[in-house]
Amino acid sequence: MFSKLKIALVLVVIGGLSGLIIFGVNELTYKQIKINIEEQEKAYYRDIFNIKDDFNMYLDITELDDDLDQEIVIYEADSSGNKIDGVIYGVAYKDITKNNYGDITIIIGVDLSGKIAKVVIGSNNNTPTFVNKIETKYLNGFTNQDINDYSVDTFTGASYTYGSVTNAIRLASDYYLESRGDE
């Protein structure tokens, strides 16, 4: 019985030390992970709006209560990172949703003329072949379509992933027309 108690005690100590090490690593890397996530977000907006890498960008992020998660207004920033009022590059809408294949993030960029600048699929755990098919064959079809009058392909062979994309575009269109339609 003493040997079983000894084994249990050793396992508790190993578990405790492992937990402390994981906590320490998380504390040490938290800031860098946050910076990396912010840079990845900015990379999506650079891609959507064809913005150069050396452009100082300020993101004005509004959390939305609707089915859509965020509205992001992309401004030019000064060298200190402060927003330069009036210099807007576009508006993006982010929808983080779940379909039958898991979580998926869709970002819809709308340029200043009310046209879809680009649609991108961000982080996701959908089937990679379906996501790749949608990205390579169908997302470019939305580019330059009017946000209030866009067409959708009815057959893609990747219905859950594409359904998430088209739903996100519909939500972005509805929100854009409701909040920015007169701009």
Image: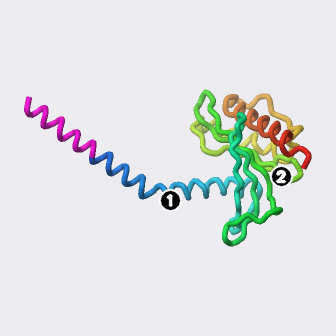
Q: Residue at 70% of width from left, 33% of height from top?
A: 164
Q: Is residue 2 magenta?
A: yes
Horizontal side of 104 relative to 27 (left or right) equals right
Residue 152 position, x and y percent, is 82, 34
- Residue 61 vs 168, above or below: the answer is below
- Secondary structure under badge 1? helix
Q: Residue at 83% of width from left, 52% of height from top?
A: 111
Mark number displayed over residue 111: 2
- Secondary structure under badge 2? loop
Q: CA distance from mark 1 to mark 2?
A: 31 Å
Question: Toward which corner of the image does residue 125 lie, by quadrant?
Answer: top right
Residue 36 position, x and y percent, is 55, 57
Highlighted range, magenta: 1-16
Three-letter residue code for mark 1:
Gln
Horizontal side of 43 relative to 14 (left or right) equals right
Q: Is residue 52 visible?
A: no
Q: Is residue 85 visible?
A: yes
Nearest the eye: 132 or 35: 35
- Residue 159 vs 24, above or below: the answer is above
Three-letter residue code for mark 2:
Asp
Mark number displayed over residue 32: 1
Q: How many residues crowd around disc 1 within 10 Å: few (fewer than 14), some, or many (20 or more)?
A: few
